[in-house]
Amino acid sequence: MQNVKGNQVETNVQFLTAEDAIAKIPANGATMMVGGFGDSGIPEYLLQAVMNRDEVTELTIMSNNITEGSNLNELFLLNRIKKAIGSYFTTNKAVMKAYNEGRIDIELIPQGTFSEALRLGGSGIPAFYTPTSAGTELAEGKETRYFNNREYVLEHSLSADVALIKAYKADKAGNLIYRKTARNFNPLMAMAADLTIVEVEEIVEVGELDPESIVTPFIFVDVIVKRVVNA
Amino acid sequence: MKLESIRHYIAWRAAQELKKGIVNLGIGIPTLVADYLTPGKVTLHSENGILGVGAAPAEGFADRDLINAGKQPITQLPHTSFFDSSLSFAMMRGGHLDATVIGALQVAENGDIASWAIPGKDVLGVGGVMDLVAGAKKVIVTTTHLNAKGEPKILSRCTYPLTAKGRVDTVITEYAVFKIRSGQLYLEEIVAGISLDELKQITPASYEVSANLQRVNAFDLVK
């Protein structure tokens, strides 16, 4: 039986500066998940550090959308993104233009299929059948199968070299909680990448987070970076 | 009648179909439905991860971490819960939503719907609507009867790319309410001021007139 005090707990989770965390990302052609929906839950501080490291380029981004005004959009404007996989790019005019000019490749996936592909990508399940998109253009070329007289589409799970996510608080073991609708895709991406880097607003002592309320257990976390707000 | 009044009438009429339960409202006219629901009876779900969507906050009280799927600021309610996107879509795809109200570019007499792409235009956004329509127990489409070019939107077959096949239950426009039962379209309600023949002329779909056809004074009904 283990009998451990909070201040003795050591996990594999590292606590680094944004610069040191981003230095771990493979330089050319990495696949990178980025959390957030609209303006909520985007790891803006980590993305700023990616922008500052020019070798991280030729990126394949998995993110629901590229929000205008966000640092993910800045990264796109720096021509560092070669492909984006997500559900909604229509409202970003610069992305539309780049797509038409052949400067970015886009793979469109329904939002529920995208989120489930992330969850299962981190769960050891390589593919799944969903009723979503059956009989539509987005199912063209995909395997389908009937269960109980309804058509389902075979979709593949997603994984990536790295996930950049945003949480509200981490404890010093690396457990995470989120805040309101800023949660969105973040806990799913934490599960689905080889290297999960988390931006948090606050780091608290082990024991300060209610174990019943922890959303992402530290097993899914590699690096935690505390967001520093410039004065 | 001004377009804004028409949109509010359609939204009000959709709210009459939603007496209680859990509902997801799409963008456009469906967003207006919230104004006409009985508070406390209908709980609103939003696909970015909230069950129990409250009204817009007072000016100056917007919270960046509290938004709906339309990316507008909202508030939380006493029974609100938050969850990740996968659980949110499990609620939708898994058949746990009592209804969804969505807009459409075209609806067909067999319940097919096209709502996300126009042929010849770039299609780089689908969002969550395919999951919503695939999963909700009841799919209510709210739309103006004609599009901005004056073309009919209720057709025998959709010509635009489909969102889903055979999933629509109810279509509500400023002129009429249609329901689809067993793959057959029925006219259930028509507003005063338009004849059955006139409606037929702007509705190139095969439909039967319900034995219980209602005639309503549409715009008098909106409080």
Image: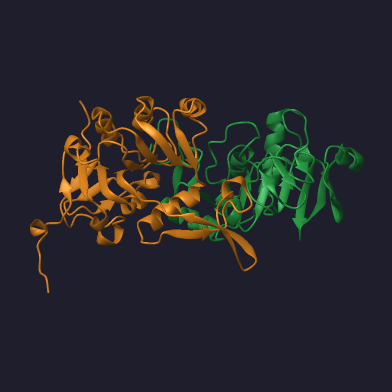
Residue at the image position 65 percent from the left and 45 percent from the top: B162
Q: Residue furthest bottom?
A: A1
State the image coordinates of residue B116 (x, y, percent, origin top left). 61, 40
Give chain B's shade.
Answer: green
Colour setting: by chain
Quick one: quadrant of the C terminus of chain B?
Answer: top right
Q: Residue at horizontal 39%, vertical 47%? A: A185
In the picture, measured across the screen, residue A74 lies left or right of residue A97, that is left
Q: Is B145 displayed left or right of A81 in the figure?
A: right
Q: Identify the residue shown where x is 49% and y is 47%.
A: A111
Q: Nearer the viewer, residue A109 or A17?
A: A109
Q: Left or right: A4 with respect to B117? A: left
Can residue B81 be seen in the rendering of this structure? no
> Which quadrant: the N terminus of chain B?
top right
Residue B146 place in picture, x, y as percent: 76, 34
In front: A125, or B12?
A125
Give the tally of numbered discs: 0
Left or right: B201 as drawn, with respect to A12? right
Q: Is residue B44 visible?
A: yes
**Residue drawn where x is 55% and y is 60% of the image:** B96
Image coordinates of residue B13 in percent, x first then y, are: 71, 45
Task: Please tell me in which quadrant of the rendered image residue A30 appears.
Answer: top left
- Residue A172: horizontal and vertical position, in percent? 16, 51
Q: Quadrant of residue A134?
A: bottom right
Location of residue B103 (image quadrant): top right
Would you place residue A70 above or below residue B197 in this image? Answer: above
Q: What letter labels the chain drawn in orange?
A: A
